[in-house]
Image (spheres, rainbow, N blue to C red):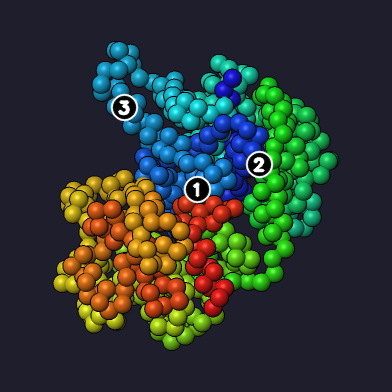
C-alpha cells in the first residue's frame, strides 16, 4: 500500500511548513519506511531559477541540476535523501506539459479542460515521483496557504486522489495560533477558519500541526478537536524551537509518527531518533561562539535567512561540530564602497564567507573585504561568485593586473580573468536564461597538497554547480606564479573548480556550491575545515 500525505498551510505562510514536511520524512524514514518528499509551488514559473532569491528565498540546486524551491534543501538535510526534478512541481510545469500534449494530439480529439486535465497532470507527476523513489509514503507539500486562489487546482488534485483511494491519502494542515500581546493567550479562531476553507475545497484535514510561540494547551486542542471533528491525539503542538533540528524529536514527543501510521493503516514501528536527540542536546549545551561575517549585497535582514539558508545551515552544522555557537554578521558590501574606513571593523569576525551572486552591484565592496581577509590572515571561504571575485582581487592586487574583472561585470574590459563559458555564449545572445547555466553535480579532482584535499580526505569529489562564467585559463599561470593554487579541476583539467592561497591560514574558494551538500550530523568537509580555522584564529 503506497501512501500519500499532503501538507497544506493554514492561516499564514513562513511558519515552517517545509521543515514540518521534512521532519515527517525524517521520522518515517527512521521507522524504516521508504519515503519521498515533493514540493509543489503555485507559481507559473517553470522552476525557481528565474526568481529573485532576495525576495523569494534561495534557489536550491539538485544533483540533476534542477533549480528548485529552498524546501528541497530542507528535505535533503532532514532525510539525507537526494531530491531531483521529480521532487518539484510547479503550475508552470503542469500547464507546459498539458499544452505540449495537446499540440501532439495526445488527447485524442477531446477538448482539454482545466479540470480535470490540470489536476490529472499534477497527480501523474506525484505518482511518477512515488514510482521513481519506490516510496511507501510520499509527502507532498503544497506551497502557500489555503484560501489562495492559485492553490485550488492542487487541492483539487489532492481531493481527487483521496476520493479514489480514501485509505491511502491523508492531509496534514500546518496552522498558526497567534498570541496577541494584549491578551497573552493563544487564539484558535484563525485556524478554525482555515479548516473551514479547506473543507470548502472538499478536504477535511486528518492532522493539525499547531505552530505557535509556546506549546498548545489542552483547552485549545479540545476546541480545535470539536470544530474539525478530530480526536485530540491528531492535534499536534508545534511550539517555536531553539533549533529547527529539535522538530523531529518534538513531533515524536507528541506521538505524531505512531498516530500518523495508525491513520494510514500502516503497522506501528519503532523510530530511532537518537541522532536527532543528541544533536539537540549538543546544541543546547554549547557555550562558546564563533563569529562568521557573510559579505554580500542587498542584505535586508528580514529575508537574509531564506536567501542564504543553505549557507547558514552549513555554517551551523560546521560550528556545532567544532563545538561552537555560530554567530552570523551580515556585512553589506556597499557600505565599504561608500565608506572604505568601515572595512577596519572587520576584525570582529573570526572568518569571512562570500556566497554566490550575480551582477556588478556591490562587487567592489566584496573585493575590499576579500582583500582584507587575505592580507590579515582571516579565514576565508568563497562560494561560486565568491571564488570568482577572490580570483579577480588576487589578479588586481597581487599580480598587478589592475583592470582585472569578470565579463559579467564589464563585458568590454580587456583583462577578463573570469569569462563566459564557451557553451554559454549562445544562451546569452538568445536570451535563453532559464535552466541553461552549468547546473548540478560535476566531478572535481583535488590536488593532493591542497587544504581541500586534507578537508575531504579524498582526491575525487563531486559538487553542485550553478554558474555561467568561469576562471579564464589564460590567467592561470600568472596567478599560480604569484602564490595562488588551483586546488581542484574538472577531470579534463580545463575548468578550475577550487582556488587556494597555500601561504594563508585558510583561504579557499570554490566554483561550486558546497552548501547544498552539508548535513546536520556530519557537516560539509570544507565548511568544517573553514570553521575549524576560524576557531583556531
Ligand atoms: N554570477 C556568477 C556566474 O554566473 C556566479 C554565479 C553564482 O554565484 N551562483 O558565473
Q: Which residue is mark 3?
A: 99
Above-or-below relation of 335 to 111: below
Q: Nearer the viewer, mark 3 or mark 1?
A: 1
Query: Dot 1: few (<14), some (14–19), or many (≥20) neighbours within 10 Å?
Result: many
Q: How far apart are the two marked residues, 1 and 2, measured between alpha carbons?
A: 22 Å
Dots 2, 3 in contact, CB < 8 A: no
Which residue is at a point 49% across and 80% down the rendered structure image? 346
Q: Which mark is residue 73?
A: 1
Which callout, 1 or 2, points at the residue further toward the start of the chain?
A: 1
Which residue is at a point 30% across and 12% down the rendered structure image? 108
Q: Position of residue 134 (x, y in %)?
A: 50, 27
Which residue is at a point 53% across and 73% down the rendered structure image? 534
Q: How far apart are the two marked residues, 2 and 3, measured between alpha carbons?
A: 35 Å
Above-or-below relation of 159 to 242: above
Q: Position of residue 270 (x, y in %)?
A: 72, 34
Which residue is at a point 56% across and 31% down the rendered structure image? 34
Amino acid at each position: 500500500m503506497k501512501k500519500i500525505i499532503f501538507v497544506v498551510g493554514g492561516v499564514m505562510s513562513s511558519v515552517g511548513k517545509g521543515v514540518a514536511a521534512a521532519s515527517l520524512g525524517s521520522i518515517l524514514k527512521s521507522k524504516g519506511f521508504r519515503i519521498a518528499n515533493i514540493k509543489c509551488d503555485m507559481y507559473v514559473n517553470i522552476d525557481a531559477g528565474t526568481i529573485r532569491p532576495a525576495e523569494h528565498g534561495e534557489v536550491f540546486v539538485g544533483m540533476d541540476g534542477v533549480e528548485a524551491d529552498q524546501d528541497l534543501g530542507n528535505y535533503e538535510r532532514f532525510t539525507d535523501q537526494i531530491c531531483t526534478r521529480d521532487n518539484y512541481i510547479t503550475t508552470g510545469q503542469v500547464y507546459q506539459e498539458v499544452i505540449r500534449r495537446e499540440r501532439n494530439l495526445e488527447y485524442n480529439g477531446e477538448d482539454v479542460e482545466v479540470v480535470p486535465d490540470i489536476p490529472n497532470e499534477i497527480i501523474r507527476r506525484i505518482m511518477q515521483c512515488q514510482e521513481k523513489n519506490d516510496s511507501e509514503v510520499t509527502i507532498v507539500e503544497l506551497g502557500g496557504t489555503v484560501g489562495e486562489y492559485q492553490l485550488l487546482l492542487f487541492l483539487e488534485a489532492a481531493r481527487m486522489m483521496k476520493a479514489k483511494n480514501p485509505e491511502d491519502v491523508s492531509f496534514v494542515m500546518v496552522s498558526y495560533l497567534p498570541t496577541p500581546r494584549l491578551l497573552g493567550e493563544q487564539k484558535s479562531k484563525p485556524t478554525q477558519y482555515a479548516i473551514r476553507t479547506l473543507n470548502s475545497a472538499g478536504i477535511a484535514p486528518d492532522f493539525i500541526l499547531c505552530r505557535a510561540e509556546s506549546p498548545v494547551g489542552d483547552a485549545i486542542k479540545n476546541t480545535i478537536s470539536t470544530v474539525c471533528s478530530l480526536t485530540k491525539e491528531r492535534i499536534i503542538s508545534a511550539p517555536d524551537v531553539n533549533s529547527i533540528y529539535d522538530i523531529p524529536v518534538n513531533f515524536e514527543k507528541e506521538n505524531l509518527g505512531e498516530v500518523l501510521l495508525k491513520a494510514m493503516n500502516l503497522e506501528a514501528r519503532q523510530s530511532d531518533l537518537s541522532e536527532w536527540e543528541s544533536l539537540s542536546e549538543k546544541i543546547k549545551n554549547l557555550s562558546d561562539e564563533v563569529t562568521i561575517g557573510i559579505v554580500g549585497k542587498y542584505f535586508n535582514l528580514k529575508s537574509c535567512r531564506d536567501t542564504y539558508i543553505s549557507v547558514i545551515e552549513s555554517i551551523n552544522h560546521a560550528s556545532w561540530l567544532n563545538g561552537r555557537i555560530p554567530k552570523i554578521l551580515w556585512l553589506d558590501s556597499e557600505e565599504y564602497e561608500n565608506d572604505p574606513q568601515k572595512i577596519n571593523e572587520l576584525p570582529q569576525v573570526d572568518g569571512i564567507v562570500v556566497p554566490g551572486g550575480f551582477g556588478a552591484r556591490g562587487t567592489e565592496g566584496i573585493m575590499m573585504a576579500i582583500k582584507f581577509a587575505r592580507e590579515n590572515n582571516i579565514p576565508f571561504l568563497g562560494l561560486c561568485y565568491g571564488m570568482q571575485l577572490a580570483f579577480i582581487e588576487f589578479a588586481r592586487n597581487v599580480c598587478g593586473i589592475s583592470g582585472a574583472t569578470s565579463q559579467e561585470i564589464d563585458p568590454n574590459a580587456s583583462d577578463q580573468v573570469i569569462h563566459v563559458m564557451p557553451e554559454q555564449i549562445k544562451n546569452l545572445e538568445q536570451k535563453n536564461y532559464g535552466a541553461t547555466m552549468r547546473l548540478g553535480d560535476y566531478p572535481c579532482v583535488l590536488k593532493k597538497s591542497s587544504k581541500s584535499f586534507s578537508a575531504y580526505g579524498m582526491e575525487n569529489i563531486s559538487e553542485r554547480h550553478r554558474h555561467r562564467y568561469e576562471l579564464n585559463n589564460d590567467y592561470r599561470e600568472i596567478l599560480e606564479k604569484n602564490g595562488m593554487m588551483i586546488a581542484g579541476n574538472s577531470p579534463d583539467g580545463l575548468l578550475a573548480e577550487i582556488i587556494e592561497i597555500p601561504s594563508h591560514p585558510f583561504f579557499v574558494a570554490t566554483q561550486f556550491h558546497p552548501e547544498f551538500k552539508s548535513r546536520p550530523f556530519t557537516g560539509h568537509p570544507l565548511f568544517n575545515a573553514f570553521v575549524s580555522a576560524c576557531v583556531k584564529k
